[in-house]
C-alpha cells in the first residue's frame, strides 16, 4: 500500500493558466514504529522522483511544508509522514495553521493496527467509549478532509478525494489520510489506471454578469471607496489587475498581513497596512469610507479592527472572493470569483460607465507622507540604553535586497512588520497571521528556501517563539538550504506582556525572569540566555549584537555565509511600535476586578463595542 501511495503521488500534476507542473515535490518525515516499516520501506525501496527530507520535529516539518506551498501560491506541495501517537499529534497545531490560512498540505500520520491483534499497541490511546478512536482522530477539526485507510483498497478513493481538496482554491487546507501501520505494509493488486498521470485543472472562476453589474452599480453610488487587499490577490496572481483597478478610479489600497507585498510600499495608492496593526493613512480612509472593497480577504478581526474600523453611516461592503463563505462577511455584496478575473471585468465595466471616485490626489499624498514620516521616526528610534526593536527593523529593512524574503508569525514583530516594513516585490513578505502559530518562523524559513533556493530568507523571530520550536534549523543545515534567523531577544513574551498591561494589569507571568523568593512570582532578574551559543551548537554560524555597528557587521557577514546563520540581537523590552488612532482589537476584559485600571479598561472596551458592527 505504501509503495502504491508513493507511485500515485509521483504522478499528480496541476494545470494553471495552461502551465502544467508537478504537484507533489517530495515527502518530509520522521520515522517511528508506526511508519518506518511501511512508508519508510517504500521511500527507501520504491523508485520515484520524490525526494525525502528528514524533519526534526513533526510540527516543524509541516510548518516548512506549509510555507513552501504558500510561497508557491498553493500550486506545489510536500507530503508529511509521521508515526502514531505523539508523533502524529505533534502535527495537529501545524494542520490547524495550514487550514486556517487555506494552504494545502498532505498529512500521512501512522495509526494503530487495523486488525487490533497486538492491542493495545505502543502509543495507542484507548478510548473506552469508542474503540475505533485513535490519536489520529484529533486531526478532524483542523483538516479540510480526513480519512482512514483501514484496508489497502481504500487508498484509491481516499487519495482521489484528497487531491480534490488539495487542489481546490476554496476548500484547500490540511488533508489528513491516516494510515494504520499494518495496512501500510499490506499488498493489493491496484489497477494500473490508479497510477496514470493525473493533471488537476485549477480553473479561474469567472464572475457572473449579474454579480459584475450589481457590483458596478454599487460602486457607482459611492464617492470614497477603499480596497482591502488580502492574500487572495497574491494566490490569484492578480497584482497587476489590482494596481490597474486602483489606478483607473483613484481608489486607495490597504493591505492585510496576508496581502502585504501585493503592491510596492511606495506606490502612490498603497496606504499601507489596515486594521488593528494598520497605518494612520489606511485607518483614516477606512473610517471615512462609504464603500469597502475586499479582494481575497477573510476580513478577520485584525483587518477590520474588530469591526470598528468603518464608521461612515452609509458604509457598504463589496467582497471579491473565490469562497462564498468569505464573500458574505460583513453582510457584503458578493462577487464569487477569482480575483484576477473579477478585477479585470469590473475595471472594464466601470471604465465604460466613466466612474471616478472623489478621492483627491493631494489628500492621499498628504496621508501617505504623514505615515511615511511616522515610519521614519520609528526606524530612527535610538535609545542610549540599547537597541530598540523598531530601530533594528529599520536597519534590516535597509539592508535586505528587494528579492529577499522575510518571514514571521507571532509576538510583537508581526504588528511592527505590518505597520513598518517596506517591501518592493511581491511574495517577499511572508507572515503567518491567520493562526499566528509560535514556532512557524524558523521551520517556515526552510520551506521558503526550498521554494526559492537562490534568494536570501530572513526569519524574524522573538526569543519566546524561538524557544518553542527551532529544530528545523538543523534540517536547513542538513539539506544545505541556508536560512538567516534574526532573533529579537527581549526577555520574554513581551507582546502579550504589553497587551496585558494595556488592559490594566501591572504585568504577570510573561517575562523570562527568575522567581522572587519573597513574592514567589517571576519578578526577579531577567534570565540571561545565550541564543548564539545554542544555535552554534547545532551547526549554525552565529553572531551576538548589542549595537547598531555590531548589527550592520553581522548582517554583512551572515550574507557571505553558505551555512544557516543566527543573529542574536539584544533589544530593549517594550520598544515596539504602538497602535495608531482608529486601531483597536477586541479582548475579553475582566468585568469584575479589584483593579481600578482594569475597571477603566473594561469601560473603554464597552465604548468601543458600541461602535462595532454586529455582523
Image: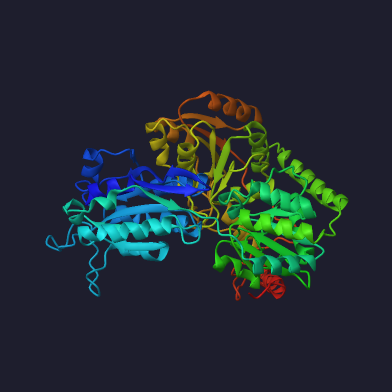
Q: Indicate whether 467 appears above or below 402.
A: below
Percent from the top left, x then y, of residue 16?
Answer: 50, 48
| Residue 601 image-quadrant placement | bottom right
Percent from the top left, x then y, of residue 372?
Answer: 77, 44
- Extreme residue toward the left, this view: 117
Q: How is the image coloured?
A: rainbow
**Res 530 seen here:** no
| Residue 332 image-quadrant placement | bottom right
Along the viewing direction, whichever of 475 and 526 lies nearer the viewer = 475
Percent from the top left, x then y, of residue 552?
Answer: 63, 28
Q: At 44% across and 34% down in the image, what residue appears? A: 535
Q: At 70% across and 59% down in the image, what residue appears? A: 346
Residue 382 placement, left or right of 32: right
**Res 611 seen here:** yes
Residue 450 placement, left or right of 334: left
| Residue 223 image-quadrant placement | bottom right
Q: Quadrant of the C terminus?
A: bottom right
Q: Indicate whether 581 appears above or below 540.
A: below
Residue 331 placement, left or right of 460: right
Q: How many marks?
A: 0
Q: At 61% across and 46% down in the image, what residue appears? A: 573
Percent from the top left, x then y, of residue 235?
Answer: 56, 51
Amino acid at each position: 500500500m505504501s509503495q502504491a501511495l508513493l507511485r500515485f503521488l509521483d504522478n499528480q500534476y496541476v494545470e494553471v493558466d495552461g502551465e502544467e507542473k508537478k504537484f507533489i515535490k517530495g515527502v518530509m518525515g520522521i520515522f517511528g514504529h508506526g511508519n518506518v516499516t511501511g512508508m519508510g520501506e517504500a521511500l527507501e525501496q520504491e523508485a520515484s522522483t520524490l525526494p525525502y527530507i528528514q524533519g526534526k520535529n513533526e510540527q516543524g516539518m509541516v510548518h516548512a511544508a506549509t510555507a513552501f506551498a504558500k510561497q508557491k501560491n498553493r500550486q506545489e506541495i510536500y507530503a508529511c509522514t509521521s508515526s502514531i501517537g505523539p508523533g502524529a499529534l505533534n502535527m495537529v497545531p501545524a494542520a490547524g495553521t495550514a487550514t486556517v490560512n487555506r494552504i494545502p498540505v498532505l498529512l500521512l500520520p501512522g495509526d494503530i493496527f487495523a486488525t487490533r491483534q497486538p492491542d493495545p499497541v505502543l502509543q495507542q490511546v484507548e478510548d473506552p467509549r469508542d474503540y475505533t478512536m485513535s490519536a489520529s482522530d484529533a486531526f478532524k477539526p483542523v483538516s479540510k478532509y480526513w480519512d482512514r485507510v483501514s484496508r489497502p483498497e481504500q487508498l484509491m478513493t481516499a487519495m482521489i478525494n484528497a487531491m480534490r481538496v488539495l487542489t481546490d482554491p476554496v476548500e484547500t487546507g490540511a488533508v489528513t489520510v491516516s494510515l494504520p501501520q499494518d495496512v501500510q505494509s499490506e499488498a493489493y493488486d491496484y489497477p494500473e489506471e490508479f497510477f496514470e498521470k493525473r493533471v488537476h485543472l485549477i480553473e479561474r472562476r469567472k464572475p457572473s454578469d449579474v454579480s459584475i453589474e450589481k457590483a458596478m452599480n454599487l460602486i457607482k453610488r459611492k464617492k470614497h471607496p477603499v480596497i482591502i487587499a488580502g492574500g487572495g490577490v497574491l494566490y490569484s496572481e492578480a497584482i497587476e489587475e489590482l494596481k490597474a483597478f486602483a489606478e483607473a478610479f483613484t481608489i486607495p489600497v490597504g493591505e492585510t498581513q496576508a496581502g502585504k507585498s501585493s503592491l510596492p510600499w511606495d506606490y502612490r495608492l498603497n496606504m499601507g497596512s489596515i486594521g488593528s496593526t494598520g497605518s494612520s493613512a489606511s485607518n483614516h480612509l477606512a473610517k471615512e469610507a462609504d464603500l469597502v472593497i475586499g479582494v481575497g480577504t477573510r476580513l478577520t478581526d485584525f483587518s477590520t479592527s474588530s469591526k470598528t474600523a468603518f464608521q461612515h453611516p452609509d458604509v457598504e461592503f463589496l467582497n471579491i472572493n473565490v469562497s462564498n463563505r468569505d464573500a458574505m462577511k460583513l453582510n457584503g455584496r458578493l462577487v464569487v470569483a477569482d480575483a484576477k478575473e473579477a478585477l479585470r471585468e469590473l475595471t472594464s465595466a466601470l471604465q465604460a460607465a466613466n466612474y471616478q471616485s472623489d478621492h483627491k490626489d493631494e489628500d492621499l499624498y498628504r496621508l501617505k507622507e504623514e505615515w511615511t514620516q511616522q515610519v521614519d521616526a520609528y526606524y530612527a528610534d535610538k535609545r542610549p540604553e540599547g537597541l530598540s526593536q523598531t530601530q533594528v527593523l529599520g536597519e534590516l529593512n535597509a539592508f535586505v535586497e528587494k528579492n529577499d524574503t522575510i518571514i514571521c508569525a507571532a509576538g510583537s514583530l508581526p504588528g511592527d512588520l505590518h505597520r513598518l516594513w517596506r517591501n518592493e516585490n511581491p511574495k517577499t513578505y511572508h507572515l503567518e497571521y491567520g493562526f499566528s502559530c509560535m514556532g512557524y518562523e524558523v521551520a517556515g524559513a526552510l520551506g521558503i528556501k526550498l521554494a526559492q533556493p537562490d534568494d536570501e530568507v530572513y526569519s524574524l523571530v522573538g526569543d519566546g517563539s524561538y524557544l518553542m520550536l527551532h529544530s528545523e534549523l538543523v534540517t536547513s543545515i542538513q539539506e544545505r538550504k541556508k536560512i538567516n534567523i534574526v532573533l529579537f531577544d527581549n526577555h520574554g513574551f513581551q507582546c502579550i506582556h504589553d497587551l496585558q498591561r494595556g488592559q490594566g494589569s501591572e504585568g504577570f507571568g510573561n517575562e523570562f525572569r527568575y522567581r522572587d523568593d519573597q513574592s514567589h512570582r517571576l519578578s526577579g532578574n531577567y534570565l540571561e540566555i545565550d541564543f548564539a551559543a545554542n544555535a552554534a551548537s547545532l551547526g549554525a554560524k552565529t553572531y551576538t549584537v548589542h549595537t547598531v555597528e555590531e548589527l550592520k557587521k553581522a548582517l554583512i557577514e551572515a550574507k557571505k555565509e553558505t551555512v544557516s546563520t543566527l543573529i542574536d540581537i539584544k533589544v530593549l523590552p517594550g520598544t515596539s511600535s504602538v497602535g495608531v488612532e482608529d486601531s483597536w482589537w477586541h479582548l475579553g476584559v475582566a468585568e469584575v476586578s479589584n483593579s481600578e485600571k482594569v475597571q477603566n479598561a473594561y469601560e473603554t472596551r464597552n465604548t468601543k463595542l458600541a461602535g462595532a458592527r454586529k455582523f
